[in-house]
Amino acid sequence: MNRILLVEDDHAIADAVALNLRTVGYEVAAFDDGNEAAASLEKDHSFDLALLDIMLPGLDGFSLFSLMQKYNIPVIYMTAKTDSESEVRGLKEGAEDYIVKPFEIVTLLVRIEKVLARTGRLNQIYRFKEFTLDAENRILTRAGEPIELTPMEFDVLTVLMKNKNRTVSRDRILNEIWGECYYGDTRTVDVRVANLRKKLGLTDEIRTISKVGYRLEERRK
Amino acid sequence: MKLWKKVSLLCGTVLILVAGICLTLLIVRSGEKVLGLTYSYAEQKQQALVTSFQNMLRYYHEEHDSEVATRSLVKYCFSQYADDEAVLIYRDETISSNLTFDPSDYLSIDNTNDLPYNDTDDVWIDEDEKPQHFVGTVNGKRLLIVGSSVDLPSEFSHSYSGNSLCRIYIVQEISPVYTQIRLMTGQFLAIGAACIIIGLICIALLVRRALRPLQTLQNAASRIAAGSYGERASVSSNDEIGALARDFNAMAASVEQRIDELTETTERQRLFIGGVTHEFKTPLTALLLNADSLQNTYMEEDEQIAALSRIRHQAHWLERLVQKLLKLITLNEKPKKEPVSVPLLLERVRESTSDTLAARGVSLETDCRVAQLELDADLMQSVLINLIDNSSKASKEGQTVTVTADAEGFAVSDSGCGIPQAEIDRITEPFYMVDRSRSKKLGGVGLGLALVKEIVKAHSGHLTIESTVGKGTIVRVILKR
């Protein structure tokens, strides 16, 4: 499980971001003050990624960056500043990426995944109930027992498990598998999902969200 | 055509006209004078000849001389005084002439009106009888013929029945005189032309010099038109152009000032709009993220409620931001100043702030030392509410915020956390917050003091802020300087 450090002073934003990150399976430590984040880093700095706001009470995002470098934590800035100066500064100093407010959660998730993959930190093992999916070695097991899937079924399941508890549109599933340029028939997705439900017995868990797509739901109660 | 050329041309035309008339008059008069001198010289010569001739004749004349003897005497006497130019016509006979023509053909002198010779007068020539003259071309030569009849004693006219007994002519060639006149005319014209040319050049130079400040002014004007508003015309003459330049510079200065003001306003507005955009982004992001979560993320009910309440909170905050912005923007209208009862105003302020102050556990004290002030009650109420709100945010529970009113204006003081000295100058800037997250938690949008400053400015007053960190802050609204 990847650990993400989130420093953002606006609680409405921080809460929503943390909620979504946790939902898809990241472990999140959130702070609303630069000084507090810095103090806590001294004790615990085993993070795979830091999401930093630039304007922060206490130490600002740029000041926190040197700490991140010390602990070798890749940084994505979240900023409301659109002026190119701060972008240039952020990237020049070695931030992996930046995302400009307002942004969509999907975009944030994709960027996080890309940075983690690029820095070789991406956890490619996803768990759902008794299933374990190893995306790197393309192995799916249920309670240790391997299950055979077609390549297409495996890819669709990977996308659903990566976005656990979040709705994924059919288009996005296709894009994740074949890339942005593919305009395939979305019914191929429906066929694979039907197969997956049958083979894995996840009829209720893989929910159809009407007119949008599918959601792999893990009820937490 | 340039103005200096026009003026020069006009002056030149007048100069040529006047000089032409003067020159013509001069030439004509001079010619007449020379001719007149020539004539009178010839006349004098003729008269002298006549007089000498008469005197001599009188001296040698004897009565009862024979006609032949008389004729010889006449001839002799004439030859004593005559030169090449003189001609004597006696009894229609031309005597002693080198001429190939008869001058009486051109100048016939009729002496039928002559008075008879009068011995007693002792005068041989009638004073009134001026010699007559003729000017004409004879055989290709320009000639002046001056002649008159000569009175002789009566016995000379014996047996003479002609028109004129005796006439003496002076025949002079006057072509050289005309040549002289032509030469003189040429010289006059040459001198005149030279004077005119020198005059024209002087006029052009002087006019150009006189109009040079105009050129300077025009250059300055076109540089200003091209955008360099700091440009001024350096014309220091005391004439109308100098006055024009001074007025022009005054105009340029006021234009520059206006442009500077506009530029400053535009820059301020640009920064303000940048600030507004930035301020809107944070709540919008929160709204989007939470709505996105509610739509796409599986959430338990309590999580959904939390997300909804975040959305509501952000929407409220946005609403407050919009309200304050609107107030700030519509403040351009002049405040309606009128005498307002200050105790009443403070009472209204106390009412509107009592809830928030109670929630923060802060009490309000008012000290009113003035009955009436000239101000816009609604706007000033908003100023005081904002200041009290700020003070109460800075105060701890149990502390007191004091509002003082006197003839100068208002003062709001607290014993709260204070403002760092370096920040005091910036806190009236829109969206500037000393402690951003704390201020946001308390619902601040960062426009309160900006609004206060604008309102006070609209009252032509000013704002002073004194603060010591940890001890408190006094904000004074000074309405009368």
Image: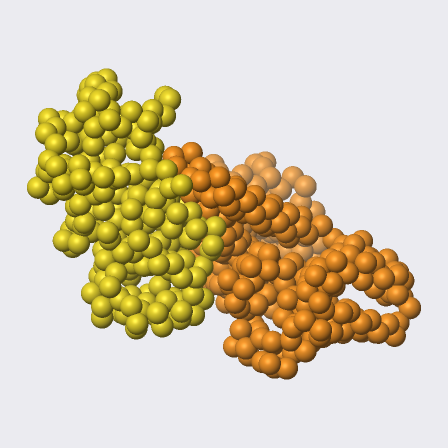
Chain colours: A yellow, B orange
Percent across and percent down for residue B196 are 45, 56
Percent across and percent down for residue B118 are 71, 54
Locate residue B333 relative to residue A67 in the image: left or right: right
Camera-side residue: A195 or A88? A195
Against B368, is A128 above or below? Answer: above
Query: In which quarter of the view is residue B465 placed?
Result: bottom right
Residue A144 can be seen in this image = yes
Residue B160 can be seen in this image = no
Q: Could you tell me which quadrant the N terminus of chain B lies in? A: top left
Locate residue A125 relative to residue B198 in the image: left or right: left
Q: Could you tell me which quadrant the C terminus of chain B lies in? A: bottom right
Locate residue B223 relative to residue B246 in the image: left or right: left
What residue is rendered at 72% in x and 63% in y? B357
What residue is rendered at 79% in x and 54% in y? B378
Camera-side residue: B207 or B78? B207
Q: Residue furthest left?
A: A137
Camera-side residue: B283 or B179? B283
Query: In which quarter of the view is residue B200 placed?
Result: bottom left
What residue is rendered at 35% in x and 59% in y? A29
Percent across and percent down for residue B302 are 50, 43
